[in-house]
Amino acid sequence: MIDDRDRIVFHKEGRFQGVGELNLYYQSWHPEGKVRAILAIVHGLGAHSDRFSNIVQHLIPKQYAVYGLDLRGHGRSQGQQGYINAWSEFREDLGAFLQLIQTQNPGCPIFLLGHSLGGAIVLDYILRCPQQASVLQGAIALAPTLGKVGVPPIRVLLGKMLSRVWPRFTLNTGIDLSAGSRDPQVLAAYTQDTLRHTLATARLATEFFATVDWINAHAGDWQLPLLILHGDADRVALPAGSDIFYQRVNCTDKLRIEYPGAYHEIQRDLNYREVMADLADWLERHLPPQTAHLGRGSGELQFPSS
Protein backbone atom coordinates (compact mmCIF):
# COMPACT_ATOMS: atom_id res chain seq x y z
CA MET A 1 0.00 0.00 0.00
CA ILE A 2 1.41 3.40 -1.04
CA ASP A 3 0.20 6.64 0.54
CA ASP A 4 1.15 9.85 -1.26
CA ARG A 5 -0.57 12.14 1.30
CA ASP A 6 -3.75 12.60 -0.72
CA ARG A 7 -4.29 9.20 -2.26
CA ILE A 8 -3.81 5.57 -1.35
CA VAL A 9 -2.73 2.93 -3.84
CA PHE A 10 -3.38 -0.70 -3.00
CA HIS A 11 -0.76 -2.96 -4.57
CA LYS A 12 -1.45 -6.69 -4.84
CA GLU A 13 0.56 -9.65 -6.11
CA GLY A 14 -0.52 -13.14 -7.03
CA ARG A 15 -0.06 -16.14 -9.27
CA PHE A 16 -2.25 -18.11 -11.65
CA GLN A 17 -1.82 -21.21 -13.80
CA GLY A 18 -0.95 -20.86 -17.45
CA VAL A 19 -0.79 -23.53 -20.15
CA GLY A 20 0.87 -26.72 -18.93
CA GLU A 21 0.20 -25.70 -15.31
CA LEU A 22 3.02 -23.16 -15.50
CA ASN A 23 3.05 -20.81 -12.51
CA LEU A 24 2.63 -17.23 -13.78
CA TYR A 25 3.04 -14.03 -11.78
CA TYR A 26 0.80 -10.98 -11.88
CA GLN A 27 0.42 -7.77 -9.92
CA SER A 28 -2.20 -5.06 -9.71
CA TRP A 29 -2.64 -1.51 -8.46
CA HIS A 30 -5.99 -0.24 -7.20
CA PRO A 31 -7.14 3.24 -6.20
CA GLU A 32 -9.06 3.92 -3.05
CA GLY A 33 -12.77 4.04 -3.74
CA LYS A 34 -14.75 3.15 -6.85
CA VAL A 35 -12.81 1.77 -9.83
CA ARG A 36 -14.05 3.23 -13.13
CA ALA A 37 -12.22 0.75 -15.39
CA ILE A 38 -9.26 -1.63 -15.53
CA LEU A 39 -6.24 -1.51 -17.81
CA ALA A 40 -4.58 -4.91 -18.30
CA ILE A 41 -0.98 -4.72 -19.59
CA VAL A 42 1.11 -7.24 -21.54
CA HIS A 43 4.83 -6.42 -21.66
CA GLY A 44 7.39 -7.06 -24.40
CA LEU A 45 10.24 -9.51 -24.95
CA GLY A 46 12.67 -9.64 -22.04
CA ALA A 47 10.63 -7.21 -19.95
CA HIS A 48 8.19 -7.70 -17.08
CA SER A 49 5.20 -6.09 -15.36
CA ASP A 50 7.27 -3.64 -13.26
CA ARG A 51 8.09 -1.57 -16.35
CA PHE A 52 4.89 0.50 -16.50
CA SER A 53 5.06 2.73 -13.43
CA ASN A 54 4.35 5.88 -15.48
CA ILE A 55 1.03 4.40 -16.61
CA VAL A 56 0.15 3.41 -13.06
CA GLN A 57 1.06 6.89 -11.77
CA HIS A 58 -1.08 8.57 -14.39
CA LEU A 59 -4.19 6.38 -14.25
CA ILE A 60 -4.62 5.58 -10.54
CA PRO A 61 -5.63 9.19 -9.69
CA LYS A 62 -8.26 8.92 -12.44
CA GLN A 63 -9.77 5.90 -10.63
CA TYR A 64 -8.46 3.19 -12.92
CA ALA A 65 -7.01 -0.08 -11.66
CA VAL A 66 -4.00 -1.50 -13.52
CA TYR A 67 -3.09 -5.18 -13.89
CA GLY A 68 0.13 -6.57 -15.34
CA LEU A 69 1.38 -10.12 -15.79
CA ASP A 70 4.86 -11.54 -16.34
CA LEU A 71 4.76 -13.66 -19.48
CA ARG A 72 6.03 -17.24 -19.27
CA GLY A 73 9.83 -17.24 -19.17
CA HIS A 74 9.85 -13.61 -18.02
CA GLY A 75 10.15 -11.75 -14.75
CA ARG A 76 8.85 -13.76 -11.81
CA SER A 77 6.98 -16.33 -13.90
CA GLN A 78 8.10 -19.88 -14.53
CA GLY A 79 9.46 -21.11 -17.86
CA GLN A 80 12.64 -21.01 -19.92
CA GLN A 81 13.63 -17.45 -20.77
CA GLY A 82 12.49 -16.46 -24.24
CA TYR A 83 10.95 -19.85 -25.06
CA ILE A 84 7.48 -21.05 -26.08
CA ASN A 85 6.39 -24.34 -27.64
CA ALA A 86 3.75 -22.52 -29.68
CA TRP A 87 2.28 -19.02 -29.83
CA SER A 88 -1.01 -20.42 -28.57
CA GLU A 89 0.61 -20.60 -25.12
CA PHE A 90 0.82 -16.79 -25.00
CA ARG A 91 -2.78 -16.57 -26.21
CA GLU A 92 -4.17 -19.02 -23.68
CA ASP A 93 -2.12 -17.53 -20.83
CA LEU A 94 -3.59 -14.12 -21.68
CA GLY A 95 -7.09 -15.59 -21.75
CA ALA A 96 -6.57 -17.04 -18.27
CA PHE A 97 -5.22 -13.70 -17.04
CA LEU A 98 -8.26 -11.80 -18.34
CA GLN A 99 -10.58 -14.38 -16.79
CA LEU A 100 -8.82 -13.84 -13.47
CA ILE A 101 -9.34 -10.09 -13.75
CA GLN A 102 -13.03 -10.55 -14.56
CA THR A 103 -13.48 -12.91 -11.61
CA GLN A 104 -11.87 -10.42 -9.23
CA ASN A 105 -13.74 -7.43 -10.68
CA PRO A 106 -17.14 -8.62 -11.96
CA GLY A 107 -18.81 -6.16 -14.29
CA CYS A 108 -15.90 -3.70 -14.39
CA PRO A 109 -14.91 -2.42 -17.88
CA ILE A 110 -11.54 -3.77 -19.08
CA PHE A 111 -9.11 -2.33 -21.62
CA LEU A 112 -6.18 -4.39 -22.91
CA LEU A 113 -2.76 -2.87 -23.65
CA GLY A 114 0.30 -4.53 -25.16
CA HIS A 115 3.79 -3.11 -25.61
CA SER A 116 6.18 -4.35 -28.32
CA LEU A 117 5.91 -8.17 -28.42
CA GLY A 118 3.00 -7.74 -26.02
CA GLY A 119 1.27 -5.71 -28.72
CA ALA A 120 1.46 -8.67 -31.09
CA ILE A 121 0.16 -10.97 -28.32
CA VAL A 122 -2.81 -8.64 -27.69
CA LEU A 123 -3.70 -8.23 -31.37
CA ASP A 124 -3.43 -11.97 -32.03
CA TYR A 125 -5.63 -12.79 -29.02
CA ILE A 126 -8.37 -10.38 -30.04
CA LEU A 127 -8.39 -11.49 -33.68
CA ARG A 128 -8.33 -15.22 -32.90
CA CYS A 129 -10.72 -15.14 -29.93
CA PRO A 130 -13.37 -12.56 -30.91
CA GLN A 131 -16.04 -13.97 -28.61
CA GLN A 132 -13.86 -13.80 -25.50
CA ALA A 133 -12.46 -10.42 -26.59
CA SER A 134 -15.93 -8.95 -27.02
CA VAL A 135 -16.01 -8.22 -23.27
CA LEU A 136 -13.19 -5.70 -23.74
CA GLN A 137 -13.85 -1.98 -24.14
CA GLY A 138 -10.92 -1.58 -26.52
CA ALA A 139 -7.27 -2.34 -27.20
CA ILE A 140 -4.09 -0.27 -27.11
CA ALA A 141 -0.85 -1.23 -28.85
CA LEU A 142 2.29 0.63 -27.81
CA ALA A 143 5.10 0.27 -30.36
CA PRO A 144 3.81 -3.14 -31.51
CA THR A 145 6.20 -5.44 -33.37
CA LEU A 146 4.24 -5.87 -36.58
CA GLY A 147 6.88 -5.43 -39.27
CA LYS A 148 10.65 -5.28 -39.40
CA VAL A 149 12.38 -5.55 -36.02
CA GLY A 150 15.76 -4.37 -34.82
CA VAL A 151 17.27 -7.85 -34.54
CA PRO A 152 20.33 -8.52 -36.75
CA PRO A 153 19.18 -10.51 -39.86
CA ILE A 154 21.73 -13.29 -39.28
CA ARG A 155 20.22 -14.02 -35.87
CA VAL A 156 16.73 -14.13 -37.36
CA LEU A 157 17.89 -16.54 -40.07
CA LEU A 158 19.67 -18.76 -37.56
CA GLY A 159 16.55 -18.91 -35.39
CA LYS A 160 14.38 -19.98 -38.31
CA MET A 161 16.86 -22.67 -39.36
CA LEU A 162 17.13 -24.18 -35.88
CA SER A 163 13.49 -23.99 -34.83
CA ARG A 164 12.61 -27.56 -35.86
CA VAL A 165 15.83 -29.36 -34.94
CA TRP A 166 16.80 -27.37 -31.83
CA PRO A 167 13.77 -25.28 -30.75
CA ARG A 168 15.27 -24.31 -27.39
CA PHE A 169 18.46 -22.96 -28.96
CA THR A 170 18.94 -19.54 -27.34
CA LEU A 171 20.60 -16.39 -28.61
CA ASN A 172 20.94 -12.86 -27.33
CA THR A 173 18.57 -10.76 -29.43
CA GLY A 174 21.32 -8.24 -30.13
CA ILE A 175 18.87 -5.34 -29.80
CA ASP A 176 20.66 -2.07 -29.04
CA LEU A 177 19.95 -1.13 -25.40
CA SER A 178 20.10 2.58 -26.20
CA ALA A 179 17.19 2.16 -28.65
CA GLY A 180 14.79 1.79 -25.71
CA SER A 181 14.58 5.38 -24.54
CA ARG A 182 16.19 8.80 -24.89
CA ASP A 183 16.10 9.21 -21.11
CA PRO A 184 19.53 8.41 -19.57
CA GLN A 185 17.91 7.51 -16.24
CA VAL A 186 15.75 4.88 -17.93
CA LEU A 187 18.77 3.40 -19.72
CA ALA A 188 20.69 3.31 -16.43
CA ALA A 189 17.77 1.50 -14.79
CA TYR A 190 17.91 -1.15 -17.53
CA THR A 191 21.39 -2.17 -16.46
CA GLN A 192 20.28 -2.55 -12.83
CA ASP A 193 17.13 -4.52 -13.65
CA THR A 194 17.73 -8.09 -12.47
CA LEU A 195 14.40 -9.30 -13.89
CA ARG A 196 15.18 -8.15 -17.43
CA HIS A 197 16.68 -10.50 -20.03
CA THR A 198 17.71 -10.23 -23.70
CA LEU A 199 17.19 -13.84 -24.79
CA ALA A 200 15.08 -15.46 -27.49
CA THR A 201 14.90 -19.05 -28.66
CA ALA A 202 14.70 -20.46 -32.18
CA ARG A 203 11.10 -21.60 -31.69
CA LEU A 204 9.99 -18.21 -30.42
CA ALA A 205 11.49 -16.59 -33.54
CA THR A 206 9.54 -18.76 -35.99
CA GLU A 207 6.32 -18.54 -33.98
CA PHE A 208 6.66 -14.76 -33.80
CA PHE A 209 7.15 -14.19 -37.52
CA ALA A 210 4.33 -16.60 -38.42
CA THR A 211 2.01 -14.82 -35.98
CA VAL A 212 2.85 -11.35 -37.32
CA ASP A 213 2.10 -12.56 -40.85
CA TRP A 214 -1.24 -13.96 -39.66
CA ILE A 215 -2.16 -10.76 -37.79
CA ASN A 216 -1.49 -8.63 -40.87
CA ALA A 217 -3.43 -11.01 -43.10
CA HIS A 218 -6.48 -10.78 -40.81
CA ALA A 219 -6.38 -7.06 -39.96
CA GLY A 220 -9.60 -6.54 -41.91
CA ASP A 221 -11.46 -8.68 -39.35
CA TRP A 222 -10.69 -6.28 -36.48
CA GLN A 223 -13.80 -5.23 -34.52
CA LEU A 224 -12.82 -3.44 -31.29
CA PRO A 225 -11.92 0.23 -30.72
CA LEU A 226 -8.17 0.45 -31.38
CA LEU A 227 -5.43 2.86 -30.34
CA ILE A 228 -1.86 2.54 -31.67
CA LEU A 229 0.92 4.74 -30.25
CA HIS A 230 4.37 4.59 -31.87
CA GLY A 231 7.58 6.62 -31.92
CA ASP A 232 8.78 7.55 -35.38
CA ALA A 233 12.42 6.95 -34.33
CA ASP A 234 11.73 3.45 -32.99
CA ARG A 235 14.60 1.19 -34.11
CA VAL A 236 13.33 -1.91 -32.27
CA ALA A 237 9.85 -2.16 -33.81
CA LEU A 238 9.87 -0.08 -36.96
CA PRO A 239 6.78 2.18 -37.08
CA ALA A 240 5.99 1.27 -40.69
CA GLY A 241 4.75 -2.11 -39.42
CA SER A 242 2.03 -0.67 -37.18
CA ASP A 243 1.04 1.82 -39.89
CA ILE A 244 0.49 -0.98 -42.43
CA PHE A 245 -1.66 -2.90 -39.94
CA TYR A 246 -3.61 0.26 -39.05
CA GLN A 247 -4.39 1.01 -42.69
CA ARG A 248 -5.76 -2.51 -43.15
CA VAL A 249 -8.16 -2.24 -40.18
CA ASN A 250 -11.67 -1.54 -41.46
CA CYS A 251 -13.18 -0.68 -38.08
CA THR A 252 -13.88 3.07 -38.03
CA ASP A 253 -13.15 3.48 -34.32
CA LYS A 254 -9.38 3.51 -34.68
CA LEU A 255 -6.62 6.02 -33.97
CA ARG A 256 -2.88 5.93 -34.55
CA ILE A 257 -0.50 8.57 -33.20
CA GLU A 258 3.16 8.73 -34.19
CA TYR A 259 5.49 10.76 -31.97
CA PRO A 260 8.40 12.60 -33.65
CA GLY A 261 11.79 11.50 -32.32
CA ALA A 262 10.36 9.00 -29.81
CA TYR A 263 12.05 5.64 -29.19
CA HIS A 264 10.68 2.17 -28.46
CA GLU A 265 9.52 2.45 -24.84
CA ILE A 266 7.34 5.48 -25.43
CA GLN A 267 5.75 5.05 -22.01
CA ARG A 268 9.20 5.80 -20.52
CA ASP A 269 10.72 8.11 -23.13
CA LEU A 270 11.31 11.85 -22.80
CA ASN A 271 7.82 12.61 -24.14
CA TYR A 272 6.04 10.14 -21.86
CA ARG A 273 3.70 12.79 -20.42
CA GLU A 274 2.33 13.47 -23.89
CA VAL A 275 1.87 9.74 -24.45
CA MET A 276 0.14 9.33 -21.09
CA ALA A 277 -2.21 12.24 -21.83
CA ASP A 278 -3.18 10.74 -25.20
CA LEU A 279 -3.73 7.32 -23.61
CA ALA A 280 -5.90 8.73 -20.80
CA ASP A 281 -7.92 10.85 -23.23
CA TRP A 282 -8.65 7.84 -25.43
CA LEU A 283 -9.63 5.71 -22.44
CA GLU A 284 -12.00 8.42 -21.18
CA ARG A 285 -13.72 8.59 -24.55
CA HIS A 286 -14.26 4.82 -24.57
CA LEU A 287 -15.62 4.31 -21.08
CA PRO A 288 -19.17 2.97 -20.94
CA PRO A 289 -21.72 5.65 -19.92
CA GLN A 290 -22.38 4.12 -16.50
CA THR A 291 -18.76 4.62 -15.39
CA ALA A 292 -17.72 7.69 -17.40
CA HIS A 293 -19.52 10.05 -15.00
CA LEU A 294 -17.87 8.74 -11.82
CA GLY A 295 -15.55 11.15 -10.01
CA ARG A 296 -11.93 11.19 -11.02
CA GLY A 297 -8.84 12.82 -9.58
CA SER A 298 -6.12 14.80 -11.27
CA GLY A 299 -2.35 14.89 -11.20
CA GLU A 300 0.04 11.98 -10.86
CA LEU A 301 1.35 9.80 -8.10
CA GLN A 302 5.07 9.90 -7.40
CA PHE A 303 6.67 6.46 -7.35
CA PRO A 304 10.37 5.65 -7.11
CA SER A 305 12.10 5.51 -10.49
CA SER A 306 12.13 2.08 -12.14
Image: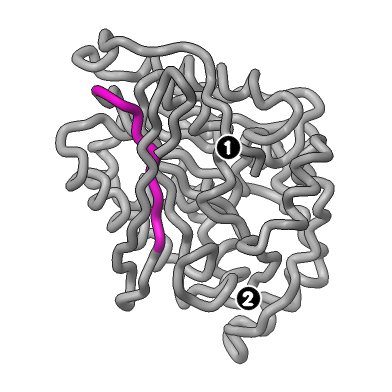
Please tell me which residue is depicted at 25% across the width and 18% down the height of the picture: 288
Question: Which quarter of the rendering shows the N terminus?
Answer: top left
Q: Write down the region rendered in magenta.
A: 25-33
Residue 280 position in % (x across, y down): 48, 20
Residue name at image x 82 percent, y 63 percent: 152
Q: How many marks?
A: 2
The image shows residue 5 at horizontal and vertical percentages of: 46, 21
- Residue under numbered circle 2: 201
State whether residue 168 appears in this view.
yes
Against 217, residue 77 (above or below) is below
Question: Helix, strand or loop at disc 1?
Answer: strand
Which residue appears farthest toward the bottom when viewing the image? 165
Residue matched to label 1:
142
Marks 2/1 in contact by CB < 8 Å: the verdict is: no
> Which amino acid does the dot numbered 1 rest on?
Leu
**Amino acid type for the residue under numbered disc 2:** Thr
**Where 101 falls versus 48 (above or below)?**
above
The furthest residue to the front = 5
Of pointers 2 and 1, the one earlier in the residue sequence: 1
Between 196 and 138, the residue placed more toward the observer is 196
Q: Evaluate whether residue 123 shows in this view.
A: no
Tell me the crowding category of disc 2: few under 14, some 14 to 19, or many 20 or more residues within 10 angstroms, Cα based.
Answer: many
Left or right placement of residue 287 versus residue 68 in this view? left
The residue located at (43%, 47%) in the rendering is 68
